[in-house]
Amino acid sequence: ASAADLAKANMVIGAAGAKIAQLEEDIQDAKDDQADERRLASNAVSMQVAEAINDHTVPGDTPSEFMAPATASTAPDTDFGVSRSSGAAKFTLTQTVAQKRDKPYAMSSAPSAGTGWMGNSFTHSGTSAKRPFTEVGVVYTDIEMAGPVMWTADALNGVSGVTGLTLTGEAVSIGSGATVGASRLTGGILPSEPAADDDTGTERVFTAPTTSRSGTFFGVTGNFVCAGACTVERNIVAGADVVTVTTGTVIFTPSGPTPAGGRMAKYADPDTDYTYFGYWMKSTTLRDGTMEHDIETFHGGMGNLTADITTVTGTAKYYGAAAGVYVKKDGTGDSLEVTDGKFTADAMLTARFGGTAIAADDAFEVEGTISRFMSGGTNLGFADLALNKADIESTTGGTPPNDTVMGRFSGETDGGGTSGNWSGMFFGNANPTPTGLTDDFTDDYPTDVSGQFNGHFVNGHVAGAFGAEMDE
């Protein structure tokens, strides 16, 4: 080929290379545009959660629980219960017969919120006002396993819901009219569980009194015998699963020798000194396909303060866990990425009560921090959220929410962004110092505290709740 032909070929090749390079650049620009669109769309979704956090308010009145009703047509406020006889904690929701039959809630384990804090998740989906919704709730508690009591008539009849028992030696007589929680019994004497929509309950009639039926009573293995024909009935009474002997007498005799130190009834002394906390988020699909979120937090505990807290002196520290929903912002401008999810964190509070060692400006105030915000195993990089000083209320009177409740408090939070708010309540002992003794007794102080909060950082937002125990 001539030099002219070669030069012409090179020009064609060069032009083709330039077109290919331009095409590759256009393809990359299109990919970048798509990535930007996905990022902006994802940012918009997370910003909807941020809006819900910003709308989240922390009431200063008596703590209330937020749980979803079967129809989810209104924001509900229903009872929530925690119990633990053995094994994992049991979480219960107060539901109507129809709700129980429909089984609107699905439960699963929640990630740990810290040592000793057990959790469960609740989910519920449906349609409200022709709009699909999904509700996800997470609850944590530090409730401990129920302890034993002595195998005596007084001790057994002192267990909540147990009445009418008598003992002859170690043999327990469950006479006509006696009541026992169904969880205290296992084996052939126990009627089947009543159906959720059956108000008449279930029963077993025994006409062969000499037939022994093995089982357990208060976790102790033994045998049941009817002293004469008897009827054992099982009902759901005020939400409790209760067994009643309606005719005759059932006698339970433990098997095996009496243990050294005396026989004990297992799981009979429930933990009455615990807290629980959590959050609930409802996500509704709007007509334009976008999502709207509502976030609620809640908390509670056992053992409301009864003694006048103004007699308590000194300082107490409380350590525990927190959990909730977060939105995080990374980067700025065209590189801004907004993400959202669930977090767990550490909670620490310091409560200053009365006494000459406490400055007047600090008396009967509580403050603290929520720190180490984690999502899975990843530290979210948020600053510590300061729970700024809040007055501890000391008297009781009136009707919620227009009252003052002993041990309750509310204040503001500071995470470096705009201020947020928090509220909570103390639970457990609040005993005055005995006359003539010093005030450095740990049982002077409330043993537990729980609360809820929202907070704003330079790089995100959070809404959550916490529970904490006094550091002894």
Image (cartoon, rainbow, N blue to C red):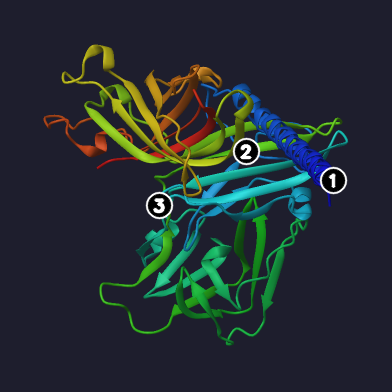
Q: Is residue 365 above or below residue 348?
A: above
Residue type at tag 1? Asp
Residue 81: x %, y % from top left: 56, 46
Res 431 seen here: no
Q: Earlier in the sequence, mark 3 or mark 1?
A: 1
For badge 3, the amino acid type reads Gly
Residue found at the far front of this picture: 2
- Which marked residue is nearer to the observer: mark 1 or mark 2? 1
Please tell me the numbered disc located at residue 128.
Answer: none
Q: Nearer the viewer, residue 144 or 223?
A: 144
Secondary element at image label 3: loop
At label 2, which amino acid type do we have?
A: Trp
Crowding around mark 3 (Cα neighbors within 10 Å: few <14, some 14 to 19, many 20+) is some
Residue that carries the numbered disc 1 in the rendered image: 5
CA separation in Å, label 3 and label 1: 83 Å
Quadrant assignment, res 203: bottom right
In front: 316, or 310? 316
Tell me the element at label 1: helix
Q: Earlier in the sequence, mark 3 or mark 2?
A: 3
Residue extending furthest toward the top:
361
Residue position for label 3: 116
Rendering coords of residue 167 (x, y %): 41, 70
Q: Which mark is residue 280?
A: 2
Q: Give x and y (percent) for residue 224.
A: 53, 79
In the depicted structure, whether residue 230 falls above or below residue 47: below
On screen, residue 414 versus residue 8, left or right, reads left
Q: Position of residue 169 (x, y in %)?
A: 36, 75
